[in-house]
Image (cartoon, coloured by chain):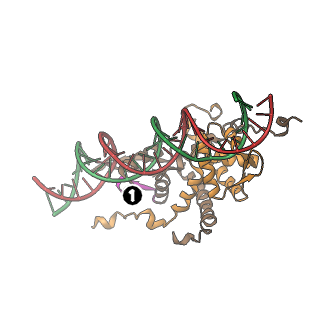
Chain colours: A orange, B brown, C green, D red
Amino acid sequence: MDSKAMKDIKIPMKERFGNYMVPVRDALEVFSGKWKIPIITALTFYETCGFKELERIVEGITPKMLSKELKFLEEHLLISRTVENTRPVTVTYSITEYGKTCKSVMSELYRWGVEHRKKVFDIEGQTWEEC
Amino acid sequence: MDSKAMKDIKIPMKERFGNYMVPVRDALEVFSGKWKIPIITALTFYETCGFKELERIVEGITPKMLSKELKFLEEHLLISRTVENTRPVTVTYSITEYGKTCKSVMSELYRWGVEHRKKVFDIEGQTWEEC
DNA sequence: TATAGTAGTATCTAAAAGTATAGCAGTATG
DNA sequence: CATACTGCTATACTTTTAGATACTACTATA
């Protein structure tokens, strides 16, 4: 008997799923990293913030990272940047209507993360509350 | 009038949300990176695969990365590793029941990613189908 | 004039993530 | 006995990401 006929050869992901991974990676590009979700959450909560305000609200971020992430989020249409004609010039960042659609993803990540923490860390005798 | 009383000072995220970010980052740890989702998807689809099989299915991955990611996913209880008593020894990796709970997160990431691609890239005259 | 607040940029460094290449131990096939 | 398959590991390297530190330019206040 032909052993090659016996073991069914599993075809690669791309062949099976095509570009299934592409939008998933797009989404991950937006949500992964240390700072994007905290910034989105801050702007979702406060609606509008200045640069220095965000620096204080998103604790630990450096101006370089904040600047970089804000540019990224603006390019991805999640936030908007407005220069106010004040002295000194102030810049306000706001969540866009589109940016608010992130909530569903973030709450799914949160929901799964809470369960995951229970599942994985309860074994090691830790509890979520202690963190 | 006191200007400090006028502008409401926005308190930091940690103070406002506590450890809200912790489970979100836990979830992102599992789903971010280049290979974890492809591996989870492959094992969700095929149920059980050998190491070399995964190397072929998840195209482009190196054995080092595959080994590393499989260890990670096993530690996080998403997959199980079984050594079969055959000659030569074969090792099979399977998705666990718990591992299947990733589906909800992945489909949310997919769903949002598809919309995002439309929103962001249609502007530049590209369409999702071309990718 | 010194200080502090606005919004950032520039430069350098460290750490993490990923890639390339090679090799090992075991078994089975021709 | 050479080749090729199984399941990996080791080493060195590059690329990406993030962080630390300092600095600019402008305005307002004491």
Above or below B16: residue B30: below
Along the line of sight, the residue nearer the viewer: C9 or A35? C9
Q: Residue at x 41, y 63 (%)?
A: A12
Give the residues in magenta: B46-57
**Chain letter for mark 1:** B
Where's the N terminus of chain A, which quadrant?
Answer: bottom left
Q: Which quadrant of the figure has residue A79?
A: bottom right
**Residue drawn at x 58%, y 44% as measured from the top left:** A65
Q: Which SS does the magenta portion mostly show?
A: helix
Disc 1: CA contacts within 10 A as few (<14), some (14-19) or many (>=20): few
Taking A56 as reference, is D29 left or right? Answer: right
Q: Position of residue A112 (x, y in %)?
A: 61, 47
Residue visible at 78% across and 38% down in the picture:
B9
Is residue B19 at least partly visible in the picture?
A: yes
Q: Is residue A17 left or right of residue B83?
A: right
Dividing the picture into quadrants, the one containing residue C13 is top left
Could you say which is closer to the camera, residue D27 or residue A71?
A: D27
The residue nearer to you, when weighing B81 against A64, is: A64
> Which residue is found at the position 59% from the left and 68% from the top?
B124
Amino acid at circle 1: Gly
Q: Is residue B76 visible?
A: no
Q: Is residue A119 magenta?
A: no
Instruction: Give how far across and how far down residue D8 sits, in percent.
Output: 34, 45
Q: Position of residue A4 (x, y in %)?
A: 30, 65
Quarter residue A56 falls in:
top right
Residue underneath mark 1: B60
